[in-house]
Amino acid sequence: MHSFEQDIKKSVAVLEAGGVLLYPTDTVWGLGCDATDADAVSKIYNIKQRSDSKAMIVLVTGERDVIQYTASVDLSLFDYLETATRPTTVIYEHGIGFAENLTAADGSIAIRICRDEFCRALIKRFGKPIVSTSANISGVPAPAHFSAIADAIKKQADFVVEHRRDDQTPHLPSSIIRWKDGEVEVIR
């Protein structure tokens, strides 16, 4: 039987080598890589058959990470996020230190503070933010659970995490917001 710890070790090795993971997140199953490695980010765009003009989400473990990888965060945002009932991704105006093909054309970056145990352990062990984009070809609906992921996607990942493969609970993508002057603007 595969263990949580084995999944974390193998995932970190793949991320460090510039590879792509297929892994469970706090929302849908995602394709992930080192958010600071442009070559790894390009691999995900290729798998998804998506242009790199569409930015992807990045997962971090906490407020400190957000502050480290963005410019001028309104700290009242964190109070709002504490009250959110579902995973919430925030579009920050200025991403810092990410792969240049990951941020949007205007320099913004979408970041979610992840509460999922597996993702938190993985990000902490890896020591850097990780890309998280739904495990599907661009334009196809996001798979609600592992068994709904296309074989073509599974085959192109350098490592497919065992953890939660049997979980048939349907999951939805996160909500996406912008935070401006203490007000929330819902994007999705």
Image (cartoon, grey):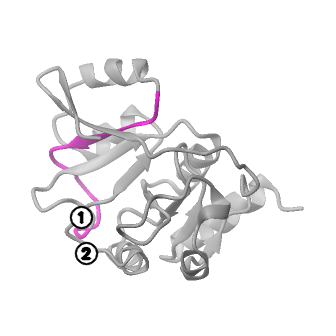
Identify the residue under disc 1: 54
Q: Quadrant of the C terminus?
A: top left
Q: Which amino acid does label 1 sit on?
A: Lys
The outermost residue toward the right is 1
1 and 2 marks in contact (CB < 8 Å): yes
Q: Which residue is drawn at 46% across and 30% down?
A: 86
**Residue 185 or 106: which is nearer the viewer?**
185
Q: Residue 51: horizontal and vertical position, in percent?
A: 25, 75
What numbered label is drawn on residue 45? none
19 horizontally vs 180: left or right: right
- Taking depth in this image into account, of 114 and 144 the one nearest to the observer is 144
Q: Which residue is drawn at 44% across and 55% down?
A: 128
- Is residue 172 a member of the stretch shown in magenta? no
- The image shows residue 84 at horizontal and vertical percentages of 41, 23
Query: Does 76 appear above or below 161?
Result: above
In this image, 102 relative to 1: left or right? left
Give the percent coordinates (x, y) of residue 147.
67, 63
Q: Name the residue under label 2.
A: 51
Magenta residues span 86-101
* Mark 2, other Cα within 10 Å: few <14 / some 14–19 / many ≥20: few
Q: Residue at x 41, y 66 (%)?
A: 140
